[in-house]
Amino acid sequence: MNRKYLLSAWAHRSTWAASAFRAKRPAAFILSAFMFSALCGPVRGQAQPTPTPAPTDDETQHLQAYVVTGSNIANAGEALSIPVSIIAPSDIVNSGVETNVLDVLRKISPAISGIGSENATIATGGQDGGSQILIHNLPTLVLVNGRRMAYDPVDGSGGAEFVDLNAIPLAAIDRIEVLSDGSSAIYGADAIGGVVNVLLKKDYNGWEADAHYGVSDTTGHYSERSGSLTGGVSNGNTSITVSLEYTQTDPIVEADRPYINPFYATTYVPGILEVFGLTTNPTTAGYGYDEAFQLVPGVNAPPGGGKYTIQQLVSMGVYKDLGSFNNPGVLSSVEQIYNLANNEYLQQSLKRQSALVNMDHQINGEKLEAFGYMLYSHVDTKSGLNAQPLFPFISDTNANLGNIGVNPLPSGTEYVPVNAPTNPLSQASLDQGYTDGSGGYSAYVHDRFEGSPRLFLNDNQALTVVGGLRGKINEDWSWEVAADLSRYQDDYSNAGLLDTNNLIAAFVDGQINPFAINQASGATNGVLGTAFVNYLSTNNTFDGLVRGKIFELPAGAVQFSAGFSFSRQNLTSIPDNNTANDLWVDSPTILPFNRNRTITSASVEIEFPIVDRSHPLPGIYSMAFDAAGRYDDYSGNVGSSKVPKVSLKYQPIDDQLTLRASAGKSFIAPQLYALYGPTQTGSSNQITYTGANGVAYDNVQFNATTGSNPNLQPSTATTWDAGFVFTPKAIPNLSISGDYFDTTQHSLISTVDENTIIQSVENQGAASPYAAQIHFGSANGPGPTGNTPGQISSRPLSSIYIFDAEVNIGAVAIKGYDASLVYALPTKDYGKFELSSTITVYDSYLIQILPSQNYYQYAGHVSTIASNTENESSGGGEGGTIPRWRTYTSITWQDKGFEFLAGQTFVPKVTDVGTGGADESPGLSVASFQQWDFALSYKMSALHWSHWTDGLKVRVGVNNAFDYQPPVAPYRLEDTLADISTYNGAIGRMFYTDISYKF
């Protein structure tokens, strides 16, 4: 695939990055092994310029300086000291993915992961339909034209903090630059894994219309369609570029994919009644009793009136006694009743309308130029889950005290009054004479209204407006200032929820019969409703930059840049009354939120040429050193951050081989919600621990404070990178690059299990790593003193306060290799052939969840811990699959207007270890995966029929030609069974057609 960027009017270099081959396993293995061998080790792909012919003695080749992502200093077409890949529109087309930026990048770059359209099931509340990108599974900064966009506002309810790639239309993209190295010294927060910089189209002359349609022949017949119109005009001083796009994709439900259909995982189905003993005393009748009963076939509901014992209902032929829920076989038999796959979305639907206007105007030639752009996107996403599960218990004083511990019940509790007309069980048969909750029985009703599935709708509007001035002071110095106003609004709604108070009222008057399989027509009127939250995130920035040459050294000019910025971020969420007051059944409580912060930043960068190619030394053809630093000051308690970075570029013999290395520090600031969101003070969870005195304390409760923490500090990282670029003159059009990366991120933001805190402080006193999270006497009282064990068990429960809000904790240490091979072979009679292959290998992926725990190895594994760690480090989490290596390879052929592409992705086996860590499940092998893609296009200009047809290009293709399905990992992926984000999505085989016309 082609990656192209313009160096100047004199020099135009092409690069080739990865395309994809996907085949049957033996062929895939051989091809991947070939590329592995050719690259001399495990590495990842990145685009590099192919060599241009050397100028003759009477020629002078002029290369205009240009700025790429990762540096504010202009380079003149030389190999960079940092690993940057450049992805052009042709690469996007060759990927066969034309609906979502994340899906394109995940497919063609093995280093990239993230959560996108598949968050329909696994991240509904954390992503709200957005697409989040990660490089090396680490926090990644997303820029548009080198500047920040507003975050997706789902952070306003404790969700992830990320820039939603759904808001960036593919039609508006000129190219994407991907820097796979930490770069906070240039850009500030978030750039731990690297930077994705989307460059928008500009200086466009003429018009181009594009249309895309794809359809899958897999069950459900997923389809997608998009259309765009891009054009522009210029007169030498003024340039205006406009781009319009419409994109729509269908949803995919789990029932349409064999690896998750049927999906049995719930006991909350109509017709099931659970009766269990309330006593915790082993010598009391009912201890350990937990029996499942099911309405017999043909019976829709039991008789009401509250007159029967459960045994009488069984003898009457109303219920069947299935056995104890403590028996795994009984539990499984109940779960087999209801297939969850029928209503759960595996992939959400998306509809996007977008517009771009990009303008430049030279006021005084290059001395003073005005620039600006407006990017607007309206994105609607929809996903769905099954109807709300219901599990109310039959309520009276004894049951209330036995189940909840208080009477009357708190607001928001699901219950069926014992005197409800539809209740079949007598109060006496349940209470057995008890009134204090210490004995007797309780009955839980398992139910859901199957005809009313839940829908999650996000109506998003993103708007970014940038305007500024730039100019040249002289031939050596230039400057730029700009204002960047960006906002992202998400109007979230969740249909199909149950209003708790109205539900209980419907139980009381008999409108709804929770014991019935089928409800009467209209029974849920006034009970079913829609929750909503209106989110808004803004990021307004004013920035400036000056760059130029300070002075000359024998090896060349010392170049310098300095920049500043002032940003104000604001985050707001406004929920409906039920959502804010916990009045929807089994739905998250989201409180109103409105906070902002300011960030003042300054950065400098300087590049020293040590040896110039015009005056080489023995063993040193060329060498340059670059140093950068940035200071960010955050309002509030976060404080300031100072991060440096140094890099070295070295050519030992000539420009055929470039060696490079960099080292630096990066950081990610705490999210606004994590700092200033609501806190809750009350009773802790039920905690079981062993005292220093040897006594086992079971299900005790202390005081606890949970939620946000205004004292959170940034999570910091140390990054190292070393690599090479080899473009041998003996083999024209060959480029090989490889990079070693080493990143350690500390102080990830998370919470600690309360059991862990109590047990650790009980054992170690003040020596416990969690001693600061325990206070005695009050929430602000003193903590443990000395290292004496027993400081918990020696005090009354009510005097102990657990501070279990979010804290800086945990770490990730990653080491691996990235590399690419690109080779072009032009022939005289058979056209041009291109081979491109990229690979990413994780040599080590260590995760430490708590300071008191060991690091555990997750390279080559799929696990819950890997997923949670990604979530805390970046706000996202992409499923917890970390293959040892992954490749993407393509071969293209071009001749006489035709272009053929074959592409392959290969992911090796991984091991499913469930939760991972100390509690990991026995390893279960998860099969390898491959996907083959093919495409054929034709440019009508090759026929020379007419200028009316010369601009027409037609392309047909098939993705996943052999319809390989993602492998199943049942221990970790309980919701979807397969990690579709890692294995190229849930679409399966898709045929598509693209038509473009330039005029």
Image (cartoon, rainbow, N blue to C red):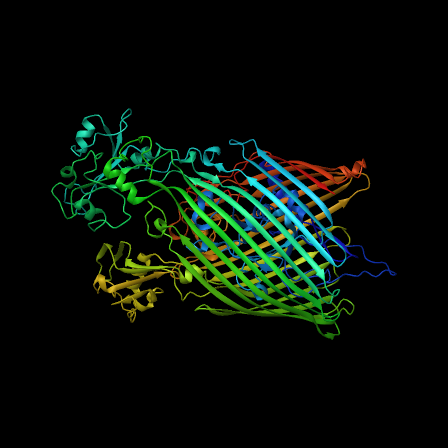
Residue 650 on image: x %, y %: 69, 65
Is residue 179 positioned above or below 386 on the image?
below
Left/right of residue 986 with respect to residue 947 in the rendered view: left
Q: Nearer the viewer, residue 591 or 836?
A: 591
Residue 326 in sight in this render: no
Residue 158 on image: x %, y %: 42, 55
Query: Splitting the image into 4 quarters, where does residue 828 fall?
Result: top right
Q: Nearer the viewer, residue 518 or 40?
A: 518
Query: Splitting the image into 4 quarters, where does residue 900 fall?
Result: top right
Is residue 97 positioned above or below 319 on the image?
below
Q: Nearer the viewer, residue 269 or 555?
A: 269
* Residue found at the far left of this picture: 433
* Residue found at the far right of this picture: 58
Q: How many marks?
A: 0
The quadrant the C terminus occupies is: top right
Q: Residue at x 20, y 32 (%)?
A: 304
The quadrant the N terminus occupies is: top right
Residue 893 on image: x %, y %: 73, 40
Q: Nearer the viewer, residue 369 or 900?
A: 369
Left/right of residue 395 with respect to residue 386 in the rendered view: left
Left/right of residue 735 with respect to residue 851 in the rendered view: right
Query: Splitting the image into 4 quarters, where does residue 526 fall?
Result: top left
* Residue found at the far top of this picture: 298
Q: Residue at x 51, y 59 (%)?
A: 538
Residue 557 in sight in this render: yes
Residue 266 on image: x %, y %: 35, 38
